[in-house]
Amino acid sequence: MARSASRVVTYSPNVFVPLTTFCRNRCAYCGFRREEGEATLLSPQEVFSLVLRGKKAGCSEVLFTLGERPEVHPRARRELEGMGYRSISDYLEELCRHILRLGLLPHTNAGILDVEELRRLRRYNASMGLMLECASRLEAHRESPGKDPGVRLEFIERAGELRIPFTTGILVGIGEGREDRRRSLEEIGRLHERYGHIQEVIIQPFSPKPGTPMGSLPPPPEEEVLETVRMAAEILPPEVGIQIPPNLVEDVVPFLREGANDLGGISEVTPDFVNPERPWPGLPSLRRRLEAEGFRLRGRLPLYPRYARDPSFMSEEVRRVVSRLADEEGYLRPPQKD
Ligand code: SF4
């Protein structure tokens, strides 16, 4: 079935938790990672203070974003051990378990994990994510072992075997070309055809960060990003969402006309810690803008409606929370009046 332009545009009200800025990789565009002396690992108190603010504000998703394999840094290892954990995945498992008990749904982006870690985290995560970034080797990833495209594709495949609703995506403007982008989208489409687990693909424009090796490069021209959305709409199976981050483009409407149908997590509580210089658009004005163009903005959970209705993609612990938060179509239930 061919993809037709969607009038329904989804987003997930979330709270963004930057669990650690320790990372084993050194991507040339990254402004999130910190050197060992300055890097941070949030304590449970810091995490839950954010989570509870999110809960109060009506968020349903807790988005964990973190550097990959922080344990390679001795200070991160010591801090984890001081809290009683052997690894970041042990810590995440415990945090996610408590978050589910609070009635919110974790979505974790932890970089490359082994299959056992992935299996353990699946139990307490509604969905998980890993940007493919690019299916070709790029200079920007020269010092990032975790950005080997083969390793990343294999990870996304493992997530498919484990039936984890999965978010991935590509970065536009980090030194790749049109054919690299096409190949990346084809590889993602191929994995989805096999496992059915790719809920969405983020088309993320590069946003330069001062002080990084790529800090003086320009962001990609809008036409290049539009062309990539068009390409994604042609290549990806129609049920796979195409996400355009609304804080990284001037106006989402031209992207929606090309086939994007999701705006990802939007937080009224926390900034985008990966792109802190780019604030989220306000929801009321975004809604008005979309409605004026004939689109309808709908809240969703961190797992897309079709997975929210399929118990084979959820643990029992996740299913219990999803059944409270989702409406009969699998979208986010509007807040109930007491
Ligand atoms: S893996 Fe992520 S956090 Fe680590 S350097 Fe690359 S972009 Fe930054």
Image (cartoon, grey):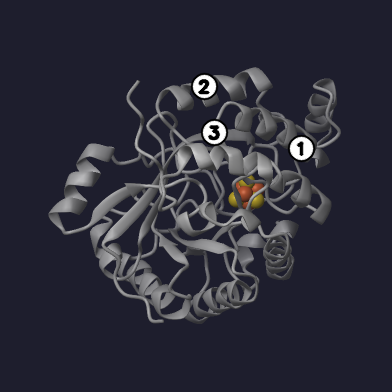
* Residue 185 place in picture, x, y as percent: 52, 74
Q: Is 67 rendered above or below residue 305?
A: above
* Residue 142 place in picture, x, y as percent: 69, 62
Q: Specify the amino acid type for callout 1.
A: Ile
Report how far apart the C-alphas of labels 3 and 2 lie in the structure.
10 Å
Question: Which quadrant of the rendered structure holds the N terminus?
Answer: bottom left
* Residue 165 place in picture, x, y as percent: 59, 57
At a point 48% along the width and 76% down the height, the residue shown is: 237
Q: Is mark 3 within 8 Å of ligand 1?
A: no
Question: Which quadrant of the rendered structure holds the C terminus?
Answer: top left
Mark toward the start of the polypeptide (3 vs 2): 2
Residue at which label 3 appears: 104
Q: Is residue 330 left or right of residue 100?
A: left
Which labelled disc corresponds to residue 88?
Answer: 1
Q: Is residue 187 left or right of residue 278?
A: right
At a point 38% along the width and 58% down the height, the residue shown is: 244
Q: Is 73 rendered above or below residue 181?
A: above
Q: How would you rate the neighbour count of disc 1 (Cα within 10 Å): few for under 14, some for 14-19, many for 20 or more?
A: many
Q: Secondary structure at mark 1?
A: helix
Q: Is 88 rendered above or below residue 295?
A: above
As rendered, which of 317 and 74 lies closer to the eye?
317
Mark toward the start of the polypeptide (1 vs 3): 1
Which labelled disc corresponds to residue 286?
Answer: none
Quadrant in which residue 8 is drawn: bottom left
Residue at which label 2 appears: 52
Q: Specify the amino acid type for callout 3.
A: Leu
Q: Specify the amino acid type for callout 2.
A: Leu
Mark toward the start of the polypeptide (1 vs 2): 2
Quadrant in which residue 254 is drawn: bottom left
Q: How would you rate the neighbour count of disc 3 (Cα within 10 Å): few for under 14, some for 14-19, many for 20 or more?
A: many
* Residue 106 place in picture, x, y as percent: 59, 39
